Image (cartoon, rainbow, N blue to C red):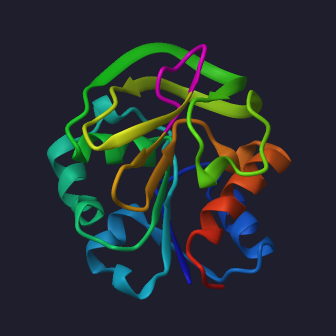
Amino acid sequence: MICIIDCDSLWTSNIKSRVEELGYKSEVVKMNSLKDSHLEKFSGIIISGRPSFVTQENIPELLDLFGFIKTTKTPILGICFGHQIIWLLYGAIIKVWELAEKMETIDFLAESVLFAGIENTSLFRESHSEFISLPENFTLLAKSESCENESMKHTDRNIYSTQFHPEASGEVGRKLIANFLKTLKIK
């Protein structure tokens, strides 16, 4: 069972559809219900985007809500807002920049299971204007013209994240989600 943490994303249903098309069961958990959820029952966690800026949120409250990321052994994929939350938990700095609201070429910088079978310089959907520095203990996996850190992975744990939106990027995004799910070794 895959947990999809819905942070009020417009594309949470896309994540759920992709996961289920790939043969996995899923359960959507609203971000505000995290404290009442038993996340240990899930084999994988995907954290959605959010239509608001991290810099406009109560950051200490977010860090408390998502603190489980630092202790869980469950593999995680953070998307956009989920990507930024992971960074914040590990001490990154937020930067606000121009809005990137388009399909954009993503350049892969390192080999990763996330990108298996996906051509380097593939187009993915962007929808963000906040960027976060690379925290310690993470490997930079991808960048774009608009963002220096499009994707990263924890060096010792199965924590992956993307600034771009694979769930809104057609077949190439479906492949990336499938690659993450393959790391779980379950259905």
Say which residue appears at 46% left-offset and 82% top-offset. Answer: 42
Please indicate whether residue 124 sits to the left or right of residue 46 in the image: right
Displayed quadrant of residue 81: top left
**Count of marks placed on residues:** 0
- Where does the magenta region start and end? 143-151
**At which x and y percent is residue 153?**
44, 47
Residue 79 in view? no
Instruction: Pick whichever, 37 or 123, lies toward us.
Output: 123
Say which residue appears at 25% left-offset and 66% top-offset. Answer: 68
Residue 31 in view? yes
Instruction: Pick whichever, 100 or 92, lies toward us.
Output: 92
Please indicate whether residue 55 sits to the left or right of residue 128 in the image: left
Please indicate whether residue 171 sits to the left or right of residue 94 in the image: right
Say which residue appears at 40% left-offset and 73% top-offset. Answer: 74
**At which x and y percent is residue 173?**
74, 48
**At which x and y percent is residue 163?**
52, 36
Displayed quadrant of residue 137: top left
Displayed quadrant of residue 93: top left
Q: Is residue 149 magenta?
A: yes
Secondary structure predominantly adopted by residues drawn in magenta: loop
Q: Is residue 43 above or below residue 162?
A: below
Instruction: State the quadrant of the N terminus.
Output: bottom right
Say which residue appears at 60% left-offset and 43% top-offset. Answer: 111
**At which x and y percent is residue 33?**
35, 71
Instruction: Pick whichever, 124 or 26, lies toward us.
Output: 124
Please indicate whether residue 55 sits to the left or right of residue 142 in the image: left
Instruction: State the quadrant of the C terminus.
Output: bottom right
> Residue reaching furthest front?
111
Q: Is residue 184 magenta?
A: no
> Residue reaching furthest left?
60
